[in-house]
Amino acid sequence: MKKTESSVETVMEDRLASLRPSDLNEAEKRSLIALAMKVLAIKHRAGRPLNSPETTRNYLRLRLADYRNEVFGCLFLDNRHRIIAMRELFHGTIDGASIHPRVVVQQALEVNAAALVFFHNHPSGVAEPSHADEAITRRLKEALSLVDVRVLDHFVVSAGESVSFAERGLL
């Protein structure tokens, strides 16, 4: 009997779905995270469309989960929301990072972005946006609108959860 691609995916999906974190030793957990990063990196490589907020959310959570300090970055997109680049632009302390609109605008122009998605982590484990997060998002959005770059979303992520500004109506 010839296996089709979908039957192979089903077998693989079923095998992994039965795993629990407690079933894995530390080396296996590290390997699983590395594999997940490779799979998600393929979905978020340059030229791929950014069409699933859930995939983006999971990718950012996995990528930023172990950071001990706050990091702010951008996913730069073309006019069809295909990824041009992903860059971590600012690194801060355990509870904040200084964000400079001028640098964000320069980076967007450098890669010729038509749109972008902001992201930053909260090492505290609480992904709830602060008033400062909302204020800098408004300020960045205003600065980028001057050069016709649209802001599609801003994700605040922690190891356990994430919040989308777009889903909350904060953009």
Image (cartoon, rainbow, N blue to C red):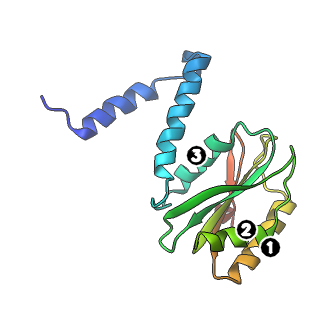
Quick check: marks 2 and 1 in contact, CB under 8 Å? no
Instruction: Give the vertical position of 106 relative to 16 (above or below).
Output: below
Closer to the chain start, of discs 2 and 1, is 2
User: Could you give the CA–CA distance between mark 2 and mark 1, rounded to whole angstroms?
Assistant: 11 Å
User: Could you give the CA–CA distance between mark 3 and mark 2, rounded to whole angstroms?
Assistant: 23 Å
Horizontal side, residue 150 vs residue 2: left or right: right
Residue at the image point whose x is 45% and y is 24% from the top? 18
Q: Quadrant of the C terminus?
A: bottom right
Q: Nearer the viewer, residue 53 or 93?
A: 93
**Where is residue 132 shown, x and y percent of the image?**
86, 62
User: Mark 2, mark 1: which one is toward the viewer?
Assistant: 2
Which amino acid type is marked by label 3? Answer: Asn
Instruction: Give the vertical position of 158 relative to 51 (above or below).
Output: above
- Circle 2 is placed at which residue position? 104
Residue at the image point whose x is 62% and y is 67% from the top? 116
Which amino acid type is marked by label 2? Answer: Val
Kind of element beneath mark 2: helix
Q: Is residue 171 among the parts visible in the rendering?
A: no
How many residues crowd mark 1 within 10 Å: few (<14), some (14–19), many (20+)? some
Q: Nearer the viewer, residue 60 or 161?
A: 60
- Circle 1 is placed at which residue position? 139
- Circle 3 is placed at which residue position? 58
Closer to the chain start, of discs 3 and 1, is 3
**Where is residue 107 shown, x and y percent of the image?**
68, 68
Quick one: which residue is furthest to the left in this view? Answer: 1
Residue at the image point whose x is 80% and y is 73% from the top? 139
Q: Quadrant of the N terminus?
A: top left
How many residues crowd mark 2 within 10 Å: few (<14), some (14–19), many (20+)? some
**Where is residue 28 shown, x and y percent of the image?**
54, 20
